[in-house]
Amino acid sequence: MIWNFFKIAWRNIWKNKLFTFINVISLAIGLSASFVIGLMVYYDFTFDTFHKDADRIYRVTTKYSSPEGLGYNHGVALPLTKASKEGITGVSQVAVFYTADPTTVTNKTFLKPLKNPQGVMYADADYLSLMNYQWLAGNPATALDGPNKVVLTESRAKAYFPNKAYDDILGQTLVYDDSIATAITGIVANFKGRTDFTFGEMISLETAKQSYMKDQLADTNWNSTSSNIQLFIKLHDKTALAGVQQQFDAMAKDHESADAAKHDQHRTFYLQPLKDLHFNTNYGIFDSSEHVGNKSVLVSLLLIALFILALGCINFINLNTAQASQRSKEIGIRKTLGSSKQQLVYQFLGETFLLTVLATLLSLGLTAVLLNVFAGFIPEGIHFKLLVSPPVIAGGLLFIVMVALLSGFYPSLYLSGFQPISILKNKNFSGQGNLSLRKGLIVFQFVIAQVFIIATLMVGKQIHFLMQKDMGFTTDAIAYARLPWNAPMAKAKLLAQQLKTIPQLEAVSLGGSPPASFNWHSTEVDFTDGNKNIHTNLQLLFGDKKYMDLYRLKLLAGRQLRNDSIPEYIINDTYRKQLGFKTPDEAIGHMIGQGKDAVPIVGVMADFNQRSLKSAIGPMAFRGDWNATYSRFNTIHFKLNNSSGGGWTTILENVRKDWSAIYPESDINIQFMDETIAKFYANESKMQTLLNWATSLAVLISCLGLLGLVIYTTERRVKEIGIRKILGASLLQLNLLLCRDFVVLILVAFAVAAPLAWYGLHQWLQEYAYRLGISSWIFALSCLGIVVLALLIMGIKTLTVANQNPVKSLRTE
């Protein structure tokens, strides 16, 4: 019986090749989009889920609140780590580690020092047991119990000692930064699952006292927070969370700064679930180069996939119900010969399942193509091989069955409901009873398509605006490179002098981060003028005398800094207004701070955007390097001569040579300002690419369904067209007659889509401090474009039918 169902299903599919093609292509496109997005969701939601008791592990982070807004830091104050170790009820384990950035690592077997090893930490022994590392060599109990010990992952051990057995690697010596000698005391297996803990070398925490971090390790200030200090805890059970959070809240309250409380600035210690690490961009992960998930984006992706898949299913429902009259006699005969309604439902569901299988096979090829197209902005770990993992296979099979049921359930009920007596009396079954449903589904399809079109046009316009807007400083032909950590300032000045001898460099400057970057430094300052006291969180920009000229930061009043070592501020115009000065000149000579910490305002510079255009311009001050403890000049900036054109490769090579001569232990990483600005909008660019594809697929599926219905409608009205031609109807009149109903549906769809698109775009644009208005021409262009496209598609068939000889269509059935 089942084999008979599939055999008849195949005959019906083969008999209606065109409609089969439209159904299969539509479903294949929807399935391939669903597979790609499903892989992205599966990939992101499986990070660090393999750890034992992962649902009870939390990272302790720091959250700030003030009248200016919220602030976040994934580190904590050092005293908190000690207080947590001493005992918090409800916690079974506490682990502490420090992220580290050694410049070199050496060993007598290395041909030369390895520069800038990534994934290095100073950790206590509890970290290795908390994260359930599998030991390949060494004793877990003693591996990190004292100074000058290090544990390697198997990948790092093989990289450092490619021809040695693990037991032979134990006892070997690794020297960090030419001064910290450590013995290898253990080797652990790489994590088998996806993880954000990308560390390869775990040095014992006691060893950090020999490094540049020794002062930080002795810090007893509860109000000094370092992003390097990582504190993790494991709860006794899930129910302990509220009680543990209350204890951390109490510690934050007990050690709150009186000055911060005076200005309504508060700090809390937030327990971040382990499963949240991969998604929470407020706190971030340990490797900034790694992919960070975004739950809201994933939800949006899932909605897009569901919409595209729904469009394919709608095509199936529309075309199958429209062809009802062609199957009516078959159904009548089957029922007369004894077939039950249930058997007919199974028959039609079998046809749907067969079509779904064909669509699935085709979608696998389309999935590979889409993964290749999106390779530039999806994580490297998302690849076609993920489809063969057991969870994905099980979920995919269930998904395919659901799609088959969704596509075929209603048509099968509708077709199997025909009455055999009425059918065999030659009553007409044209599907008119289902006309309202088909019209509603067509409207739904084009609502989705037009929302995508409008969104694509507006997002593209906003991104173009963001990329082209003047940031307030020059970015053209400017590059910068971070200096080695903790390197002597004398070497930095020597490098600057060397670069100035390169004739193709217009300017060279030492300073902190660029005017706009992902890194910034801020401090709290007070300005007192009579009885008025203004407390502000002030962002600081560090640079020498050449910095402002290099970036062409405009001076509105006052003068440049005299030199790098004299305490002076050049404030921006936003801060000037916040202080209450009517003109830039009025601010000159006033002091920021009090007593020995007072610093004069010597200049006012024009505002510029310090970060992406999502953020408004905040108060800022430009200053030199007058900190006696350590230098704030950690970056070298230089401007290339624009006239050099293609000669930039040679210029950058000369820069690298000068760098290598002064910092042989460290590699240079040159970044261009225009690339940095582009990174601000990486998510927007990805969104635009995704919308472009989603729009193309939605329009394609909708138009395929429209084409199928037009073909069916014109074939059913061939005699009518013939009679109208004989009576004198023109081609234009016939075309309007056949297309009118569909155009009306498209216009109705636009009327529904326009307010939905406007609302969604309005909400999205609120994220940007600088944004464009929603232009009416975008809506008009979307409506006109989809109508013209629909008319072209409909015209392909309607003009062909209208041009046929009416005598031929009227001569015979």
Image: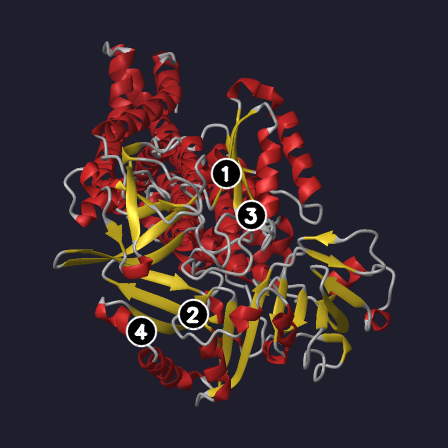
Q: Position of residue 348 (x, y in %)?
A: 46, 51
In which quadrant is the N terminus drawn? bottom right
> Label 4, on which residue?
257
Mark 3 vs 4: CB contact within 8 A: no
Q: Amino acid at mark 1?
A: Ile
Q: Amino acid at mark 4?
A: Ser
Mark 4 or mark 2, whichever is nearer to me: 4
For label 4, the SS is loop
Task: Report the quarter where the C terminus lies.
Answer: top left
Lower sequence index among marks 1 and 2: 1
Instruction: Give the Cα separation between the discs numbered 4 and 2.
Output: 18 Å
Q: Is residue 741 left or right of residue 19?
A: left
The residue positioned farthest toward the left in the image shown: 531
Alpha-carbon neighbours of circle 2 within 10 Å: few (<14), some, or many (≥20)? many
Mark 2 vs mark 3, foreground winner is: 2
Q: Nearer the viewer, mark 1 or mark 2?
A: 2
Foreground of the two, 145 or 660: 660
- Secondary element under disc 1, as helix, strand or loop, is helix
- Whether label 4 touches label 2, CB < 8 Å: no
Disc 3 target residue: 360
Q: Which residue is mark 2?
A: 61
Q: Is residue 49 visible?
A: no
Distance from disc 1 to disc 3, alpha carbons, whole Å, reads 10 Å
Q: Residue at x 28, y 69 (%)?
A: 260
> What is the distance, in whole Å, between disc 3 and disc 4 at their CAs?
62 Å
Check the image and report above or below for 619 versus 20. Answer: below
Q: Is disc 4 surrounded by few (<14), some (14 to 19) or many (20+) residues within 10 Å?
A: some
In contact (CB < 8 Å): disc 1 and disc 3: no
Q: Residue beneath label 1, please?
A: 25
Residue kind at label 2, given as amino acid type: Thr
Q: Are marks 1 and 2 in contact (CB under 8 Å)?
A: no
